[in-house]
Amino acid sequence: GIIYELKGNYSEALDHSRRSLSIKEKLGDKIGITYTLNNMAGVYSLMGNDEDALFYYSRAISMREELGDKKGIAICYVNLAELYIRRMDHRKALEKLLKCTELSKQVGYKDMDSYAHRLMSESHYILGDYKNAFQHFKIHLELKDSLFNEEKSKEIGKLEAKHEYEIAEIKQRQEELHRLGITKRPPYDLEEAGDTLASTQYKNVTLLRAKRTAKILRFSGFLVALIFLIIQMHGKRAK
C-alpha cells in the first residue's frame, strides 16, 4: 500500500491497505491497525477526500488513546494539522499542533515537537500574529539545535569507546610481544597519543557546533528584523 502511495496510485494503495486492515483485525493486532488507519487517512488526504481522511484519523486517534500510544497520537495530530493547513483553516491546525506539542514533550519526541512548532510559526504568520510566529520559530530552532547536540554527543561517545578499545588492544599486543622478546617497549606513550587524538576530535566537533550556533543566531537576527519591518508596515497602513 505504501509503495503504491509513493507511486501516486492511490486506488491501489487503498485496496492493499484495506486488505492489510482486514488481516490485522483478524489477528487482533491493535498497534498494526492504528498504523494502517493512519496510512489510509493520509492517502485520502492526498486525494483531497478530507471527509474520509478525518474519519480514519479519528479512528486511529481513538485506538491509540486506548493503547496509551502518545507518540502515535502526536503523529495523528500533526497529520490532521497538515490537512487543515492545506484547507487554509489555520486556527484548527493550531489546535491540533498544540495537542501534538503537549504529547511530544511528555514522551520526549523532540523531532515531532520541533516540526510542530515550525508549522505553528507558519500558521501564526499567515494569521498575522507575528509575535507568536517568532516565538514558535525560536522554539523550533532551539529543539533542532538540541537534537543536533545530542546526535554529536552520541557520535563522540562512540568515537571515544572505539578509541579506548583500539588503544587497549594495541597495548596488549605490544606487551605480549615484549614478553616474548620480539619487540622492545613502545618509544612513546600510547595513552598520551590517545589523549591528543581525542582532544583533536573534540575540537573538531566543538568548532562544528560553534559554526551551527552562529548560523542560527544570524538567521534569528534576520527573522527578528523582518518581523519588526512587517509590523511597522502594517502600522503605517493602519494609520
Image (cartoon, helix red, strand yellow):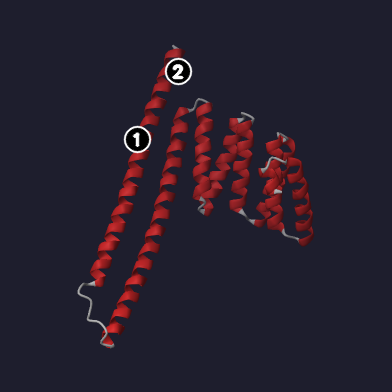
Q: Could you tell whether 98 is left or right of 144 in the image?
A: right
Q: Secondary structure at mark 2?
A: helix
Q: Who's the residue at 44% across and 45% down the image?
A: 144
The answer to which of 192 and 179 lies nearer the viewer is 179
Q: Who's the residue at 28% across and 82% down the image?
A: 175
Give the position of the C terminus as an image quadrant.
top left
Can I make out residue 58 in this image?
Answer: no
Q: Position of residue 217 (x, y in %)?
A: 35, 38
Decide: is 94 above or below 12: above
Discs 2/1, front: 1
Residue 13 badge:
none
Q: Identify the residue under disc 1.
A: 218
Number of marks drawn:
2
Q: Picture quarter containing residue 139?
A: top left
The answer to which of 51 and 181 lies nearer the viewer is 181
Instruction: Give the residue type that dot 1 points to.
Output: Arg
Instruction: Give the residue type that dot 2 points to.
Output: His
Q: Who's the residue at 32% across and 75% down the image?
A: 170
Q: Position of residue 220 (x, y in %)?
A: 38, 35
Q: Position of residue 231 (x, y in %)?
A: 42, 22
Residue 234 badge:
2
Decide: is 25 above or below 114: below
Find the distance from the CA under tag 2 to the CA under tag 1: 25 Å
Can I make out residue 148 in this image?
Answer: yes
Q: Secondary structure at mark 1?
A: helix
In the rendered structure, which disc, 2 or 1, sits on the residue that comes first in sequence? 1
Q: Who's the residue at 59% across and 47% down the image?
A: 74
Mark 2 touching mark 1, by CB under 8 A?
Answer: no
Q: Position of residue 134 (x, y in %)?
A: 44, 33
Residue at the outermost bottom position? 180
